[in-house]
Image (cartoon, rainbow, N blue to C red):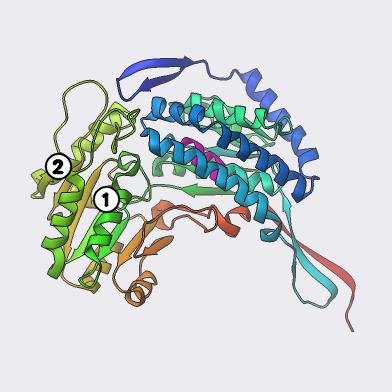
Amino acid sequence: MLTVIDPTTGKVIREVMPDTDAVVEAKLAKAAQAYIAWRTTSFSERAKVMCAVAANMRARVAELAPIMTEEMGKPIREARGEVEKAAWCAEHYAEHAETYLAPQVIGSDATHSYVQHLPIGPVLGILPWNAPFWLAFRFCAPALMAGNTCLMKHDPHVPGCAAAIADVFTQAGAPDGIFQTLMLETPNVERVIRDTRVRAVSFTGSGRGGSAVAAIAASEIKPAVLELGGSDPCIVLADADLNKAADVLKVSRIINAGQSCIAAKRIIVEAPVYDEMTEHLRTRFASLKMADPREEDTDVGPIARSNLRDELHRQISSTVAAGARCLLGGELPKGSGFFYPVTLLADVEPGMCAYAEETFGPVGVIIRANDAQHALSLANDTEYGLAASVWSTPERGQALAREIEAGQVAVNGIVKTDPRLPSGGIKKSGYGRELGPHGIHAFVNAQQVWVGPVRG
């Protein structure tokens, strides 16, 4: 049973029966059958479908956004923004897919030789709960525009979001079978990955889950893209604009109640400005309002599940016990729901829990660095490598970016995902890229074509 608990109240609001074996088989067969026709459509025909899907989402923002708020606690303002961003992703690939996948002429001994980018078949997306609409379209928009069909297995805690996304395609008049959602409990996903009709897998989630998915896909000789966790560093050097950095870090760390893989989780501040930057952050974090996510002025909603909140509190308590200063929050609130207060920890050092582990919640972690080189060493002192940011002069920031072990680096700005730019990690944050031109190339056959005769 897929059980939905409203994290604002802690009450069960919905129970959804998982798909039966017969339903799963029917969806797999439909995806394979739909691929036969969809792969032959032109880019312009695919673009019309994706634009219709985007238009349907934009017209229904007021209807779709509250489903996220109900199922995983996203503040309603952020939920509306997420639906709009998902629509933008669909529109971006509708406009640019043909250019991204244009044939590449490569000289050889042939009269004419080139590489063309062809679809590969049904692609399975296995997605988490923290950005239900955005992550769905980050997966499906490039895959569909490349001529593949998509099967989406969403997190079991957001079945309403999953059903709503599928309904968007239906209401937009998309060809039957090009996008379907699988209502499955997690243990039943393996057989779908192994099914011969599924040609590739896109996974976003935990390192443990990604490792399992990657092993299964590899055993079936299937490509996979993994976007996993992060303990993302933000380096603030003495020559940074501290007010601007603090403004951006407040948003970067607290958006979605801090439940973001690319949030600024370790704020590494150069010693000469450490105290000043700490006070900037304390002031800004203290101004945030934690409340019912349905209220328009709420900044921070609940943690999505009780076990996630318990794990977060363990990390905070362990870090404080090891010697960190708790400047804000750090205590479990009374009352219903899975709320956790905005928390700010200072003087965090290597070896402490919040330094070494990914913290998934509204928790700022401040670390002192002796100088820029020490800050870089601290930034890279993690098993993760998803994203990072640097606050300094543009020149120093770009120079440091080359030394940071991460898939994306923002200099004097917020780390974000953008349909125009590739996103992904290294080390234990995963492999492969999503979005931008790189993302649409993840699930295509780069087919070499050699046309004779041999040139004289």
Residue 209 showing in the rendered view: yes
Residue 268, image x and y in percent? 22, 61
Whether residue 186 is situated above or below residue 17 in the rendered picture: below
Instruction: Name the kind of residue labelled 2 in the image.
Output: Ser
Seen from the viewer's position, the closer of residues 178 and 216 is 178
The picture quadrant where one finds residue 7 is top left
N-terminal-most mark, 2 or 1: 1
Helix, strand or loop for disc 1: helix
Q: Percent x, y for residue 160?
A: 49, 24
Residue 136 in magenta stretch: yes
Q: Is residue 255 left or right of residue 270?
A: right
**Picture coordinates of residue 68 (x, y %)?**
43, 30
Is residue 78 toward the left or the right of residue 339 in the image? right
* Label tally: 2
Q: Say which residue label 1 marks.
A: 250
Q: Is residue 110 left or right of residue 98?
A: right
Range of the magenta residues?
132-138
Give the camera-side residue of 63 and 409. Answer: 63
